[in-house]
Amino acid sequence: MAVEATTDCLSALTEARVSSLKLASTTLPFLDRQNSVVIAEALSLDRTISTMDCSASQRAATSALINCLESNRNGNQLLVASEHRRTKAGSRAEMLWGDAAAAVAIGDDDVIAQCLGVATHAVDFIDHYRGDGADFDYDWEERWIRDEGFMKIVPTVVESVLDDAGVAAADIKHFILPTDQARTPAALAKRLGINAEAIVDNQIASVGVAGAAQPLLLLAKALESATAGDTILLLGFGQGCDAILLRATDKLAQCKPRLGLSSALLRRWEETNYNKFLSFNNLVERDIGKRGEADKQTYLSGYNRRKDLLTSFLGGKCRECGTVQIPREKYCVNPECNALDSQDVYSFASQQGTVLTWTADRLTFDWSPPAYFGMVEFDGGGKLMMDFTEVEEGSIDSGSRVSVHFRIRQFDPQRGFRKYFWKAIVED
């Protein structure tokens, strides 16, 4: 999700130079492997950039955003927040939470929202927690969280940032308070003197509350409807509160991502099978069959040799004859050329292609059977056998147009490793 969100963010930039990448999440897949580096390599970013993982709080994204705003780095800084929290079956959290990722770019030139001020209040208020090794969050009573947490901590921070910026509460056009408590944003807005019309909906019905990703998700939502001059108050709550005050500029109308939140929701594929939901989230033990029991160990030395293909999805283009191929090898695959060491790096990550052949395999184990795979021919040249994902039955055929996306290829539960690769998705 983080790679998808960051790719969409980069589509809106005219200057692609990136100086840093931060990833915010409380559900990072690796505890001792920098997750932000995986994203950087998937996006083929320069290896001289600064990378950082930010975690351990629901305000991880807003704290990271403040850090970006207060730094003096040249070039664009990328911040992406991504969250996939597990919940107990039948719990309140299962009804209200969701999985999502959102990304923003921070820079000095042609900004769509200018920072007017920031404020932070750090306090160890424990509304919920997830201990080391725990699968699920443990939270306390909602009313107590509202009365002792939101209603006492948030006003202090908001009043501070508004006073410093010289902005009246009534002038706030977009008020963002990430929470799964439906009535709390309205109660706080009333207490602070913010108009009720300014409250940005938490998208519980369409997305669910996405933990550390929720502030950036709602910021993206607010920017879709904002006009030049609108003030946006973005809050992050968790062991204190962050407040970021922004003002939309006249560049907003000209700088739009390829998809954005609204378009992403329109493209969503709803899964109504609750048993699949439980299976996908490992809330039930599923029979994977004998074929699924094969050892899935990743040989890290071999992976390191091929990570330009596996993570960055890079192939090669022959300098002698112009033939494009994937994977990149020492010899050109053109039989009339076969030049040695003639391959320049060629990215397939943004390439579209056409399905030449395909099959739906119900014998191979797949978390969402059947397993679809086949041969894809890319528009710029090159062919590769690929997995297809997010396939609705009957939607794929030879000649179908596809794009490629960074996805989980396999889980290795024995060693706690997950393999990423690129899969093809049929375009509408």
Image: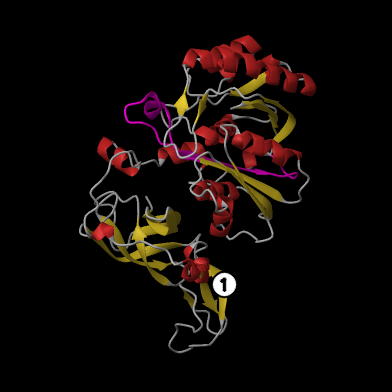
Image height check: is 372 above or below 341? above
> Which residue sits at x=37%, y=55%?
414
| Horizontal arrangement in the rendering, residue 61 relative to residue 263 (left or right) | right
Q: How is the image coloured?
A: secondary structure
- The picture quadrant where one finds residue 90 is top left
Q: Which x, y percent locates residue 100?
A: 47, 39
Q: Which x, y percent locates residue 194?
A: 63, 14
The residue wearing badge 1 is 345
- The picture quadrant where one finds residue 220 is top right
Q: Specify whether residue 16 is in view.
A: yes
> Which residue sits at x=53%, y=22%?
127
Q: Specify whether residue 250 is in view.
A: no
* Kind of element beneath mark 1: strand
Q: Which x, y percent locates residue 341?
A: 56, 84
Q: Indicate whether residue 99 is drawn in magenta.
A: yes
Graded by Cα atoms within 10 Å as few (under 14), some (14 to 19) or many (20 or more), the crowding at tag 1 reads some
- The picture quadrant where one finds residue 219 is top right
Viewer-side residue, 6 vs 293: 293
Q: Indicate whether residue 71 is drawn in magenta.
A: no
Residue type at numbered disc 1: Val
> Which residue sits at x=53%, y=36%?
213
Q: Which contiguous range is marked in magenta? A: 83-111
